[in-house]
Image: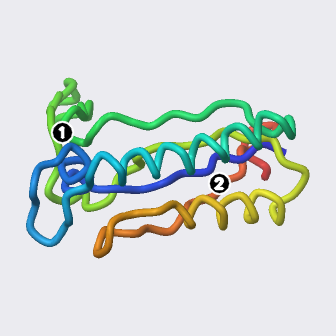
Amino acid sequence: MKYLVMVQGTQADYEAQAGKPTAGVPVWSKEDIQAMYAHMGAINDDLAESGEFIDAQGLAEPAQTRLVGKGPDGKPVITDGPYGETKEVIAGYWLLECASLERVTEIAERVIQCPVPEGANEYPVVIRPLGDDGGDA
């Protein structure tokens, strides 16, 4: 079965990783970033070796977001940038093919072990099965 495994973050997290101080979020050092990439790279390598890896991507910061909605007149309304009502966004994902929910949960447990600086935000990993045949999971 295919699963989408998602990690979350906020605009403040992206800024902290870029070395910009933000209230309540510690700045990440180059070593912190390297440790994160090494951890995620090792997971990717293991998943590729096991044949479970389909795709993985980190997503650009929320400030680069574009929202396309419908206005009251039915015409498109396009808005750029982060949104105050959105606290956490998807920061990256894996698309995996795993034998079971238990197996993908083991992978998510490994993802949350990613090293972060003291005091950095930590988020749960979201697992969503991909629906087969129009949405049955």
For mark 1, does the 10 Å Cα neighbourhood hold few (<14), some (14 to 19), or many (20 or more) residues? few
Question: For the residue labelled by badge 2, is the local secondary structure a helix, a strand or a loop?
Answer: strand
**Viewer-nearest of labels 1 and 2?**
1
Q: Residue furthest top?
A: 75
Mark 1 vs mark 2: which is more N-terminal?
A: 1
Question: What kind of residue is marked 2?
Answer: Arg
Q: Residue at label 1?
A: 63
Splitting the image into 4 quarters, where does residue 95 fall?
Answer: top right
Horizontal side, residue 19 vs residue 55: left or right: left
Q: Is residue 108 above or below residue 39?
A: below
Provide residue 53's location: percent of width, then percent of height: 74, 36
Provide residue 87's location: percent of width, then percent of height: 25, 61
Provide residue 112's location: percent of width, then percent of height: 55, 65
Q: Is residue 96 above or below residue 80?
A: below
Horizontal side, residue 116 vs residue 5: left or right: left
Q: Nearer the viewer, residue 67 or 124?
A: 124
Residue pictured at 50% horizontal, 68% vertical: 124
Q: Nearer the viewer, residue 65 or 27?
A: 27
For mark 2, does the 10 Å Cα neighbourhood hold few (<14), some (14 to 19), or many (20 or more) residues? some
Horizontal side, residue 124 vs residue 59: left or right: right
